[in-house]
């Protein structure tokens, strides 16, 4: 009888895993089509931006027309923000909040407003990425599939997560990085089931992008045959410097949010700041317009002065952050990689030209790690894009040192900070922070709890009995479970409930 019951459970698990795999494939198809379409639209809009930057040089009247167009685009962005606030920014913090049950947005509505808002921002030349939005678009595609298939809340979270994997996979052509980012940054919990559905979605989305939409890799890196041990001291220094620059980035984003708050602009007019700055850059410094993915090859193929690269880094970084903190739909993932590439080119000025490409690749991964604090994703992402094993060790070392330095300097990872802002602005409670106190207590021989069932005890508000250990055995607590002397209880509760619990039950 016992063997039969175990077999039934195993069979059920196998069926669940098979269902999740099939659901992951469905999400991958849908998210792949949505993500590839979005990527092509953004790519087309960036071509229009660069054409416009050249064309307005032919006459003053075209600059005036451009200013009018940018003001209109700013108003449209503001209107879209007002209509659907959850479609603002990169979308990654919103997905994290969805997974933990603190947000429940309308997936179809977010898809429509995110695509439209991202396209408008890109046409305005704002320095934003498509990768964060692609993750949210993938996640909302997963949620939509879940609603159509009428899945339960637990399965819906799986499909949202695997949709996020598909989104990053289609954005970079990096399915492994898509899976790791979703687990490391979004779901934050590793199980066999989540790996199965995320991997199936990411692979299918990547296949659709490559073979149906003919998407090409974002970056083309040259081949570096061998990385000798003599370069590792420089890698150590670079990793530490990237941790410092990453801290500068995370500090600056907070400052700019506070400046926008002090301006106290209506949400409809808030994007105008970024669009007006974009107008100035269209005229005086168009190289920083758009996401800037073409800059990487430009930096690898040419040698630039230290002063030029410093100016490029600070203008690109500040414009990207001004664009992002305005609230419009668009991400920071790709601009962060571009800024890292600029820092790598700057660092390579102190070494032989043959190391330029290597330092650019290392800086992209290390800078991303310092800002986001997802080192595994950063390492695998650059590894997948370069497809070279001999980069792996220096990338890993650079990322770990950047991670360590940024942590020592004490700034919060950017997506955690952005999630806190969303929860605060929407007056939502951070359940992860509230329910983080675990108390382990023993029931004494003279306790008045002995003989009572769990449901009969007047516990303090908001507590959870997560485990009972009795005579060396683990017992799953139920309302009908009777408490006995020497039971060892594991109790989870809100921080503010601890004092009341101890006062009531601390015998």
Image (spheres, rainbow, N blue to C red):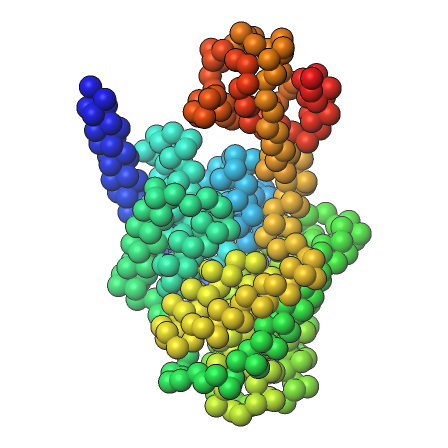
Of 213 and 279, nearer the camera is 213
> For residue 435, which quarter of the picture?
top right
> For residue 389, which quarter of the picture?
bottom left
Residue found 38% across the figure and 47% down from its top:
162
Residue 168 horizontal side relative to residue 18, left or right: right
Quarter that holds the N terminus: top left
Residue found 55% across the figure and 54% down from its top:
90
Residue found 59% across the figure and 72% down from its top:
239
Residue 356 horizontal side relative to residue 264, left or right: left
Residue 95 horizontal side relative to residue 428, left or right: left
Q: Is residue 459 above or below residue 430?
A: above
Q: Residue extending furthest bottom? A: 352
List x then y, in percent, for residue 113: 51, 47
List x then y, in percent, for residue 417: 64, 50
Residue 131 visible in image: yes
Residue 273 visible in image: no
List x then y, in percent, for residue 210: 30, 64
List x then y, in percent, for residue 144: 39, 39
> For residue 437, which quarter of the picture?
top right
Of 143 and 391, nearer the camera is 391
């Amino acid at each position: 009888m016992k063997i039969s019951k175990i077999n039934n459970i195993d069979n059920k698990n196998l069926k669940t895993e098979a269902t999740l795999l099939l659901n992951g494939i469905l999400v991958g198809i849908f998210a792949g089509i949505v993500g590839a379409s979005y990527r092509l639209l953004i790519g087309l809009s960036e071509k229009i931006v660069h054409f416009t930057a050249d064309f307005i040089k032919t006459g003053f009247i075209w600059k005036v027309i451009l200013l009018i167009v940018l003001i209109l685009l700013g108003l449209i962005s503001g209107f879209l923000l007002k209509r659907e606030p959850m479609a603002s920014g990169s979308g990654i913090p919103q997905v994290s909040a969805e997974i933990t049950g603190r947000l429940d947005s309308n997936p179809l509505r977010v898809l429509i407003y995110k695509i439209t808002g991202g396209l408008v921002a890109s046409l305005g030349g704002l320095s934003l990425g498509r990768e964060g939005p692609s993750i949210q678009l993938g996640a909302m595609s997963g949620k939509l599939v879940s609603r159509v298939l009428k899945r339960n809340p637990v399965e819906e979270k799986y499909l949202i997560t695997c949709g996020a994997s598909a989104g990053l996979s289609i954005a970079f052509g990096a399915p492994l990085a898509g899976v790791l980012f979703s687990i490391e940054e979004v779901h934050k919990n590793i199980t066999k089931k989540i790996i199965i559905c995320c991997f199936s979605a990411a692979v299918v989305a990547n296949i659709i992008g490559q073979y149906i939409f003919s998407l090409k890799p974002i970056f083309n890196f040259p081949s570096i045959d061998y990385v000798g041990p003599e370069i590792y001291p420089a890698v150590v220094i670079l990793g530490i410097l990237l941790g410092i620059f990453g801290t500068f980035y995370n500090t600056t984003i907070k400052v700019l949010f506070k400046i926008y708050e002090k301006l106290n602009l209506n949400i409809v007019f808030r994007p105008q700041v970024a669009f007006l700055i974009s107008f100035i850059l269209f005229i005086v410094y168009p190289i920083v317009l758009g996401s800037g993915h073409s800059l990487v090859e430009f930096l690898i193929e040419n040698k630039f002065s230290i002063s030029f690269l410093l100016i490029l880094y600070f203008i690109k970084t500040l414009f990207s952050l001004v664009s992002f903190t305005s609230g419009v739909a668009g991400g920071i993932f790709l601009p962060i990689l571009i800024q890292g590439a600029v820092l790598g080119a700057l660092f390579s000025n102190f070494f032989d030209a043959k190391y330029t490409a290597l330092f650019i690749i290392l800086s992209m991964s290390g800078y991303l790690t310092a800002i986001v604090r997802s080192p595994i994703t950063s390492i695998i992402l650059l590894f997948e894009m370069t497809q070279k094993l001999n980069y792996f060790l220096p990338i890993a070392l650079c990322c770990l040192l950047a991670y360590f330095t940024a942590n020592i300097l004490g700034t919060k990872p950017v997506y955690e900070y952005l999630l806190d802002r969303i929860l605060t602005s929407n007056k939502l409670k951070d359940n992860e922070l509230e329910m983080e106190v675990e108390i382990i207590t023993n029931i004494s021989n003279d306790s008045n709890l002995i003989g009572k069932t769990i449901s009969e005890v007047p516990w303090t508000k908001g507590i959870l009995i997560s485990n009972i250990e009795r005579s060396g055995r683990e017992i799953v607590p139920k309302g009908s479970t009777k408490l006995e002397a020497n039971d060892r209880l594991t109790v989870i509760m809100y921080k503010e409930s601890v004092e009341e619990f101890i006062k009531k039950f601390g015998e």
